[in-house]
Amino acid sequence: MTFGVVVLGATGFTGRLACEYLANRGGSKVAWAMAGRDLGKLEALRKDLPEAAKEVTLLKVDVKNEEELKDVAKKTKVILNFAGTPYFDKALPVVEACVSSGCCYVDITGEVPFMKTSADRYDAKAREAKALILHSCGFDSIPCDMAAWMAATAMRERHGMACAAIRNAVMDAAGGASGGTIYSGLGMLTQDVENKAAMMDPYGMDPPDGQRGPDTADGGTTDLPRWDELQEKWLMISPLSNPSCRTVRRSNALLGYPYGQGLSYGEGIVVPGPVSGWLGTMALGFMVGSLYFPPTRWALKRWVLPEPGQGPSRKAMEEGRFTVRAVALGEKAKSDGQIPKVVAKVDSVNAGDPGYKATALMSVETALCCALERGRCAEGGVMTPAAGLGQVLVDRLNAAGMKLEVEP
């Protein structure tokens, strides 16, 4: 039997949500399966799914077993991989199996070292095999990546020019955190992983022949709280800006710099003013700093942080939301002397909290792009959501109930 989508790591916190969504939204249109190490856990999950998924195929797949990975990749259009926590020591064999079989791959990682290593090792091979490898396909980094792409595309179409700058801002967000995401970040902070230096380089995920721009920080020029002239808002650093900014800059490079060869790109979270911005920045810095030191790290793990597999309540996920807004500034003035601006927005509407329910939706729709609309996607390579999918992903997310639009 062949499959359109195989959900690997299906019994994890976000994997379960993805299976629920796929059963309700996409299961009738695509043959799919759930995969993992423990068939008993998979069977228990299947019993909890909607009636339409009661016969979904279960596959025993261990990410450490090369033959099992290759076997499932050979009979699958796209593997949607949630077997991380962290991804950097588990997912590369899955990527390799997909590339060797010409199978597409989707995940929700925000691990810059892993994504850099994946691109270094497999981009050329994936292009040759016409396998589309897509990382960071959840809240990190689809909203910012697609908002920047929409704004830059509209700038070209409306005004015939590239952008001098794009600023993305999280205008509104509510949701919780799962143990898996926290422990993935903890692993990158505390372990010596390949390509860790890419986290410190604003262009650390660009292709080898990429052109460096003016950015020196994830906020563009600074990560400190600031009044942003483009957004006309006070912004503080976003915890997700490290992978998200590098994803957007990689999109620009992979597409041939249509956003602008000298583009300045940055992100932030909207705050009421400078005081709240500094308080938020200090709180974030304290939390990250505490994770570096064994005594405070142990205390946080013991009493504060959720365990892998744990996450927000169903009620919190249902009530969660987010809005991301990109403002693009043209690279030159028009005949009237005005420099044009374009604004694009990504609104979750009723998709749920950003980190889990909405991430499940976005990752499944990304996988369905590859499974059902492959002809509208890039041929292959280690890509980004914007560079690999572009308009097809915008269309699918809008059809799924989110709202991605460029303001008139």
Image (cartoon, rainbow, N blue to C red):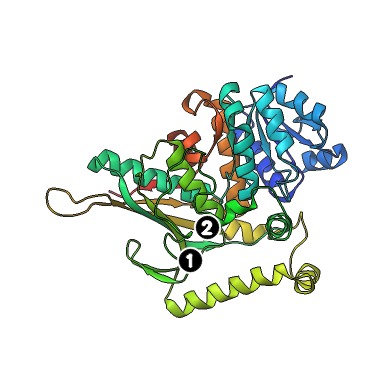
Q: Is residue 333 left or right of residue 323?
A: left
Point 56% across, 44% down: residue? 362
User: Counting other residues with Cα less than 10 Å from the Cα at mark 1, is it few (<14), some (14-19), or many (20 or more)?
Assistant: some
Q: Is residue 295 left or right of residue 120?
A: right
What is the three-letter code of the residue carrying label 1?
A: Asp
For the question of whether residue 32 can be seen, the reply is no
> If you read the primary sequence from the N terminus, does the residue marked by circle 1 or circle 2 appear first?
1
Percent position of residue 7, x then y? 70, 36
Q: Where 223 falls versus 161 (above or below)?
A: below
Is disc 1 placed on a helix, strand or loop?
A: loop
Question: Residue farthest to the top?
Answer: 1
Q: Is residue 109 left or right of residue 328?
A: right
For marks 1 and 2, give the one nearer the viewer. 1
Query: Which residue has dot 1 on it?
Result: 223
Point 21% across, 53% down: residue? 339
For the question of whether residue 408 can be seen, the reply is yes
Rendering quarter of residue 31: top right
Percent position of residue 190, x then y? 73, 60
Whether residues under marks 1 and 2 lie with C-beta atoms below 8 angstroms apart, the answer is yes
Point 50% across, 65% down: residue? 237
Please tell me which residue lies in front, 48 or 215: 215
Query: Which residue has dot 2 on it?
Result: 241
Please tell me which residue lies in front, 297 or 74: 297
Q: Where 62 falls versus 277 (above or below)?
A: above
Quadrant location, the N terminus: top right
